[in-house]
Structure formats: structure tokens, C-alpha cells
Amino acid sequence: MDASRRDLLKSAAILLVDQWASLRGRAFADELSGAARKDERKIIVVACGGIRRAETFDDTGIGNISHLYREMLPRSVFYPFLRNAGVTSHYNTISSILTGNWQRLDDWGKTPPASPTVFEYLRKLLELPQDDAWLISSNKALSSRIGASSIRDFGPRYGANVVFPKQLLINAVIRAASQGHPEHSADRAAMQSEIEAVLLHTDSYEGLDWSVSGDASLPDLRMQSSMLQAIEDLVRTNAPITGDEFTFLVSQEVMRRFAPALLVMTFSDVEVAHFGSYSMHLAGIRTMDRLVYELWDMVQAHPTYSGRTTIFVLPEFGRDFDGSSNNGFFNHRSSDDSTSLTWMMCLGEAVQTTGVVEQPVQHIDLCPTIAGLLGLKPLDLPGRSLPGIRMGSGTQ
Amino acid sequence: MMDTNAQARPHDLDAYRHLIERLPVTLRPSLNQQLSQWELLFPFELNRLAAFMKGVQAFSPDALDALTGPLNALEMKMGVKQWNFSEASDTIENASLLARSAYYAEWRREVQRVFEAINAAAIDSSPAHIESTRLILLVLPRSLPVDPQTIWRKWDPRGHEIGISGDSERLSELVTQGQLRPTGPAAMQAQPGNAEASDLWLIEADGKLDGTLSSLSPFAVTCLNYETLKPFRDRFLAELNKAPKSIQVTDEIISNLRRESWDGWSLWPPEISGQPRLRKFVIDLYLSGNGALIFSNAFVEWAACEAIRRARPRTMVARFGMRSKPKPFTSIAIFENQQRVSSLPDVDDPENSAVDAAILAHYTWLAACRYPEGEQAICLCVSEFLNSAYLVAPAGKNPGWSPGRAVTPEEVYAWIAAQMAV
């Protein structure tokens, strides 16, 4: 990625997080972090959409995941048999990961999860503030309802901040076209103003389907000098800007400023597969591979995270097999292993011993594992804590 | 046979509706949808639906109850009666409700069991089918630099690579210009003069082949061209993009788009405008997703797969093509029309178009293999860039060209023509 393009996305991400931070009177996490906060464990979950083993941890796919395979696998606990035994749609799978229960909800996020999310357990039982729980997603199939369940004793007051940065970009592109100036989409400076306009000229976050600070109010928008600088740096290129790249940059800014205990990122560049471009699907896998490596690098380098952070990386599911009646890689509807069997990698502080755990595990095992790592007593959930993970004292 | 079935209404269609009422609820939407579009079904679909109904009729009421009892019981457990489940047609909500049921996998197995039993009964009561050799020609044009190391790696081990000497582009010209006329029993199945029920389908990304069609051919040709569909596609995409993030509202919009006549817009290309069955085929194609509205190669693949499934043509020629590079920002709104949302000129993306086309050509053949006709099909996938092709011949019909010897397009064509004349 060229530097100017990266600068643009980074500046936009900084702008977003600045707005939340200024609204809430928050400074950088580093400035706020006391000794107690620095001792806290941190968990980052990266869910990467639908990716088949054939395009990743198979002989045919290793070339797409050079960072994961060469640099991160040797440092990880690797689970080659991660089973999605639920509904292989995005909203249901992410909800299942978050709740430790297989969810069977409206696929397009019309209803909240039917059992408490790990965000709610953490916030209610450990009295964590909302800044400690974030879900930042590229995926349009999710909705802000995913941050908290419909359970009365839990619910939105214990929910996570939910942000869809890609939706901001999409709205900006559509706005430019609908207002009769598609040329803006070819010009980074013009797009910058379109992005700002979407933020400035909406009545609430609802148009973006975000849930930040537990409400949908519009933050006080202020242009930042870094954004102005980035606009000046724009160059006209044809290089694509991806939703996952922007999601990652926003996530980085959230990490820097809020240092949340639990951050869930979901990528979705790979979902271009639904439109039938295999090359763009593979490009999405390579982008994910690079971004996860950059995340790992950041975690190692940043004192707030180094030595106390555990990262889980997993596809939500696979995709349908070549020759399936669902048109192969395009979709993820079949119950075949190509779709329901995938992998997971755990890196960082909680890794007991690096290696491969051949024991089958499930997506719903992640919730009780995260809860245990962050100090909750065992929850009554169908999922089980993952093997090979070093839990905190008194939790397991 | 098509006419017999097409003229079956209204009495037979009413009888069919009554038969459908005897089937479990979750089997009804697809069958009712087909009945409601009877005049717009392809001959193969008409015959298959009529045969299926014959199969249902072959069961006594008690036997049908016994057959469908487990599925009915499963629907009770799933709570289908409490769902907002459309019996009139397949909907996104139907699919979503079924897929998120805890009994979904079991339901799929039961549906398959019931269909297999009914189809078996239908076959028992139908005359023997005449099989003839078919051709699936998949063309990766010279502009697509496919990787010679991997291009044929995943292909059917029954086949083999052949080198083509001379101009490999000549091969598709020979097929489209030529006289792949069936003789003997196969001729009985041909559909002279009926473009909507034609034996030759030509589906392409960029309209390079339809100019090579022989006007002398007695057999009508069905042509679908991604480029010439652009005015209709753009309009259709704009309408579809109005759908909000709601399954129910999207189903409503899709239903309206299906019902819309689209005749008043003058958007259809001439080769389709007078053919309601083909217009319906294109609309169904666009509404079933799979990228047919967005990428030319996805359109070619999905149109070819659907044509093979629904029309079972004797000859399918699918020619892939070039897509443009994604543009800044518009790539994140991939469902949008790039030309509408960006003023930057399109720039070809040959390497990635080749990656897309290679796997999609393979998928087209894999789709054909799912049907009995696939066993009688010659599949020839030609890379004009490599002057190479992969040939899968029906059992016992291998041409026997010695390995390593390149063959001319004329030799390949002559062999195909000889097989198809039988």
C-alpha cells in the first residue's frame, strides 16, 4: 500500500477516534494508564469472514498466508479442527462466538443475541466501563444489535461499542454519486470531504448503524490538523482502498486511546467472493494475513499490550466446496466440512505451550475462554474453555 | 413434448396444484413458483416438472403419506406452521428460516429422500430417454494470461491437456459457425427455429463471438452477452440497491422486480427483447446473486450453470473476458456500479481476470457434471493465450491423439462434430 493512501485511511481513523475521545473527555490510554490498568489482561479477537482451508492452511493455500504460516504459526497454539456447528451466516456466527451459545437469529441482524454476550458478562460481573468493550467490523451483515443481548438482566447497558468503519466509506461513496459528483470517488481529497460530510451531516449514528457510548448521538465533530495534512498528501491513484484496512486503522486508534480489555475485529474483504471474483477473494485473504501480522507487531511494541495480550485469529467458517450446488467459493451455505470446518490460532500471553492442538474445538468455546482469561468464574455455557490456554488463577 | 406440457393448462395445472397441496409445506414454494411461471419455463423444466407430478401421482394416498410422514413430522418439530413461510415462491426469508433451524441438516436429508423417491417413481413411469453427445466449450480468451503451471491442475482426471497448433481462436469460430447438427435419434431432440428452446447457447463477456454466428444455421441460437445487457443491468442494479437491510422488505422488492414487465424501458438488447422466456431467465439470474450483476466472468459462469441446469442445451459455448481493476473507494462498495460512482476510466486487469476466469470455467464444467447429461458431454476448455486446451470426453469416446502432438483447431472440431453427429 502506498504511503499516502495509508495516511489517508489513518487520518480518517484518527479523526473518528478523536471525536469519540473528545466527546468523552478521554485522553490517550498511555497517559491514563495506572499500574492497575497496565496489569490487566487484554484480549483481541480477529474474525476473518468465510475462508476455506484450501486457500489457507492447506498445501494449496499457504502462499496466501505467508505471515500467519511462517511467522505466527510457530508462536501459536494452533487449532486445525475448529467446527462451526451453528448457522454459517455472519450475524449468527459472530453472535455465537460472543455468547458461547449457537445463535439462530435473523441473518441480517434484526434481533439481538438471545443470550448474554461476553461483553455483557465482563461489564456486569467485573464492572468494566464501556470503553473496555469494542466490536469494530467491516461486515455489512452485522448490525449494532450484536453488541448486547436481549436478556433483561444484561442488555445494552452492559453492551459493547459497535462501529462499522467501512459503512462510513460506503455511505461517502454513495453520497458522492447520488449528489452528482462521482469524480470525487477518484480523488482522495474530495473523498475526504465526503467522509467528513457523512459524519457531520447525519442526525445520529443510525445511518451508519453504530452504537457508541451506548447511544446514537452525534459527537461534536472537529476537523483535526492531522486530517488536513493527510488531505494535502493525497495522490491520485487507482489503487483500491479496502474496508478491512480502514477497520484495522480504526481498531488501532481505539487500542491506542482506550486500551480496551476486549476488542473484537471482524474483517470482510474476503466476502467479495459472493460476487464471484476469486482473485479479489484471495487478495482479501492476503490483506487479512498482513493486517493480523501488523496487529501482532503493534501488540509486541506497545507497552500497554506487550506481555499481557492474547490474540485469537479465526475464520467465521469456510466456504462451499468446488462443485457444490451452492457455486463453490461464492457462498457458505452447505453443511459440508469445506464450510463448517475451519481453524483458529491463539497467540500471545495466554499461550501455554506453542503447538498444534488436534482436539476438535468449536466457535462457542471462545466465549468461556475469554471470560476465564479476563477473570470471570466459569460460566454455565455449552462452550468449553479451549485446551492449551493458560487461564488466570482461580478461574479454571 | 414441450408443447404438450405447455398446453396442459388449465386442467392439468389445477391437478398439479392439488398434488402440491398433498406435499409437505417446505416442498411447496419451489413447485408453486414453477407452476406460476409455466409459460416461461424451458422445455426441460416443463418435462421435469410434469414428470415429477407424474411421480407424485404414482403414489397412492397412503403410500405418499408414508413417504412424506417423516418430513411432515420434522416440519412440526421445526415449527414451520408458526413461521412467516411463503408457500407461493422461494424467498430469502424462507431460506433464512430453514437454514437457521436446528434441524436444517436433517431437513435437507429428508427433502432429498422424498425427492429421490418421487423422481424414481417418475422415471419408472416415463419412456426411456434418448441420450446424445453434448458439447461444453469454455473459452479463456487470448487477453487472459493464465498460469500454465496451475491452469489445468484441478481439472477432471478423466481428461487431458492438448496442445493446439495454429490459431486456437479459430476453434470457437468453427463451433459457432459450424454445423454441429445432430443426425439420427439426436436430431429428434433438436429445436429448429426456436431460439428460446435452442440447442446452442452462446454466453459471453464481451460479444466477440455472436458476430461469428452462421446465419445459415437451421438451429436457433440463444445469445447472452454481458456487454449488451448493460443498459438493463444498470437499471436493474439501481432498483435492487434500493433494498434496505431487511429480509422481508428485500423479498418484497425482489418479488416486485420479478413481476415488473421491463418492456417499457427499451433496455433489452435485440437478441432478447422479443423472447419473454429469456428475459425471465436473465431476471432470475440477476436476482439469484452470484455476481452476475457485477462481474462479467461471474455472469458468464452463473448464466452457463443456470442454463445447463434449466435448459440442458446440447451445445454450450461460454466465453470469459476481462474485468476492470477496482477503483479507489468504489472497491469498498462493490455492489455498486463502478462507472456510476467513479469518473475514473476503466483499466483492464488481465492477470486477475485470468485467475477469475480459470476457476469459473472449471466451475461451469463441475456444474454440468451434476446432471446425467454431463456423462455424455464433451468438455473442452480452451486457453487461447496458451494455445492449449483441456479435453474431457465421455467414456469410450477419447480421440486418441498421441500425447505431445499439437492438433489443429480443424482436427479438434472435426472430432467434436463426428461425436455429435451420432
Image: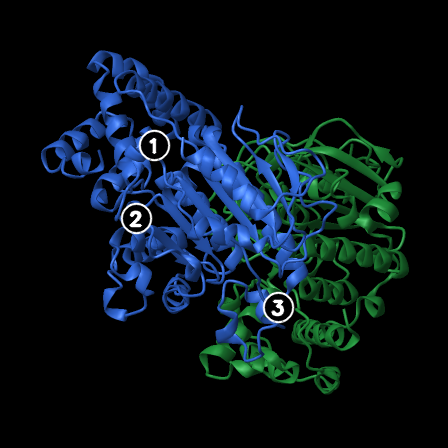
User: Circle 2 sits on which residue?
Assistant: B218
- Per the rendering, the colour in which chain B appears is blue
Do marks 3 and 1 share a chain?
yes
Q: Which residue is mark 3?
A: B348
Q: Earlier in the sequence, mark 3 or mark 2?
A: 2
Q: Quadrant of residue A335?
A: top right
Give x and y (percent) for residue B10: 10, 37
Under tag 3, what secondary structure? loop
- Closer to us: A149 or B178: B178
Q: Amino acid at mark 2?
A: Pro
Question: Can the viewer see residue A2 in this picture?
Answer: yes
x then y, percent, for residue B231? 38, 69
Q: Which residue is mark 1?
A: B186
- Chain label for disc 1: B
From the viewer's side, name the closer residue of A347 and B400: B400
Disc 1 crowd rating (10 Å Cα; few below 14, some 14-19, many 20+) is some
Q: Quick one: label 1 or label 2, which is nearer the N terminus?
A: 1
Q: Secondary structure at mark 1?
A: helix
Secondary-structure class at tag 2: loop
In this picture, residue A273 sits left or right of residue B238: right
Which quadrant holds the C terminus of chain B? Answer: top left
- What letter labels the chain drawn in green? A
Question: Marks 1 and 2: CB-CB under 8 Å?
Answer: no
Q: Residue at x 53, y 47 (%)?
A: B138
**Number of numbered markers:** 3
Disc 1 to disc 2, how far (Cα)? 15 Å
